[in-house]
Amino acid sequence: MAVPHDLPLVSTVAVGMSLAFVLGLIAVKLRVPPIVGYLLAGVIMGPHTPGFVADLSLAEQLSEIGIVLLMFGVGLHFSLKDLMEVRRIALPGAVVQIAVAMAMGAGLTYIWGWSLASGLMFGLALSVASTVVLLRSLEEHNLLQTNDGRIAIGWLIVEDLAMVLALVLIPALAVNFGTSAVGHEGAVVAPLWQTLGTALAKLAVFVVVMLVVGKRLLPWLLTMVARTRSRELFTLAVFGMALGVAYGAAKMFGVSFALGAFFAGMMIRESDLNHEVADRALPFQDAFAVLFFIAVGMLFDPSILWENPFHVVLVVAIIMVGKSLAALSIVLLFGYPLKTGLLVSAGLAQIGEFSFILVTLGMAYGLLPEEGRNLILAGAMISIALNPLTFFFSRQIYEYVGRRPRLSNMFNVVDNDLACLRADEKQSLRDLVIMVGYGRVGRHVAENIQNAHIDLVIIDQNRERVEALRENGFHAIAGDASYPEVLQQASIDRAVAVVITVPDPFEARRILETARDLKADIQVLVRAHNDEELSYFMEQQVNLALTGPREIGRRMVEYLRLMRSEQADL
């Protein structure tokens, strides 16, 4: 196909972005994540399909910018506070799940006759879920601010940090395994401990420089630029820092572009301007991320689907069944309810951008055969496309279990200290109020109830939060209040009211129904997020339903009326 003036960069970007837009729009209309459309655009433009073939080398260079901006965005939104809140489940859970996925991948490739190094690399690429897909799925299901959503995000943060460490260690390990495709034939290879030690030392120096210098310098520079009131200069500063730190980290410390960009984002997060940085970076990050997915799609050879369909099915099974069952088992073993396990397992039943980065790295260092790359890309596209179904089936399983008391008792984990009130606690409670959800809203409600000297029992799914509440003298239990057993453990028979402050509207509805089934005359006070939810709760004849915007408006009008009456008296 002839291109005017022979401009391969322009043609690659123009055709790629246009095709990605059309296919992404079709994907959204089909209720499939748009990433599937972007990957398909790359497949169509790639050398393995007829028609227009884009310049792969240019696409790969553009995708490097996409990787840098993706990792910059991950660092910019990385919250150590959120991770620490769910660390007891997210940290061991993610580590064990990565190990299980690597073992499954290595075991499968051993049967296929691959080397151990290739098998471990293959399993590692299958172990890490897509941040983009998970966040969008949680947002779509209104789960982003829930405790279950925070656990899933914390789990993914640990996975991302593990992959960041892998980006440092893989090149060093590849050289010692003698598989490096970018090294020199006949070169003297240092011992493994020396290679790893050198890589980790460089990483440590880089981290220290970023924490000591970057943490102060980057926010200070942004503040200085912001004072110029120049939008384009501020935008240029953001991208200069992201790309400059990434490039400097690679050249001076031998770490990857991705790791340098991640730390640049983390340091800029310390600035008071971090929200403005995110607003400026997001559109460009999205655009270059699309080019990244297009470049990945161009590498994919679709013939793998009909030449080795059984291999593709096994890979998809590891991603969507093996990983999910491992995550579900881990969550349940840590004493969390079935709903948390189902949501975490559904959110992690896919792979995405980090897997693609690992594929690129594995190919560069000769750790992955071409078949491995195609299998991983096939697994990614299929798992991302089917991910909405995993959320649907997880909700169906949850509702099925909830309708059967025996299964409900089995999976709700009520036989532990945090799920029960002590006998002496129950005896001391009279005319109590049960509050479900100790989040941003629940904290204020609990404080006011406590100040009114009303007996209060708090139910929350975050076990660490329940432990902290008990240490501070609150009556609290861990569990899912949509199960009858949990409300019974909270002594609903002695309660005069239930206050529901959970952010998930579907969960709030189930709690309302369960509370009314157990005690028809109980007073129900509920938090609504919008007028539609408010209307629903009023139809259910709750005693009090409030929304934030309505209450703010009402209090402002009350103040204005009071002000006018005071002026009239004067």
Image (cartoon, rainbow, N blue to C red):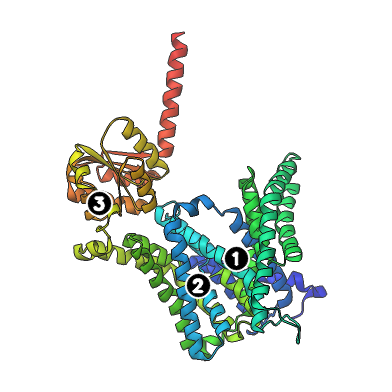
Q: What residue type is disc 2 on?
A: Ser
Q: What residue type is disc 1 on?
A: Val
- Circle number at residue 164: 1
Q: First in sequence, mark 3 or 1: give its number.
A: 1
- Circle number at residue 79: none
Classify residue 416 as left or right of residue 152. Answer: left
In this rendering, is residue 544 above or below 75? Answer: above
Q: Nearer the viewer, residue 172 or 217?
A: 172
Query: Residue at the location (44% across, 13% down)?
Result: 566
Asked if disc 2 and disc 1 are in contact, CB closer than 8 Å, the reply is: no
- Circle number at residue 420: 3
Callout in the foreground (2, 1): 1
Q: Nearer the viewer, residue 179 or 525?
A: 179
| Badge 2: residue crowd in 10 Å (few <14, some 14–19, many ≥20) | many
Say which element carries label 1: helix
Spatial CA span between label 2 and label 1: 13 Å
Query: Residue at the location (17% across, 46% down)?
Result: 519
Q: Position of residue 127 (x, y in %)?
A: 50, 72
Taking the view exactly as shown, the residue that stands out farthest to the top is 570
Say which element carries label 3: loop
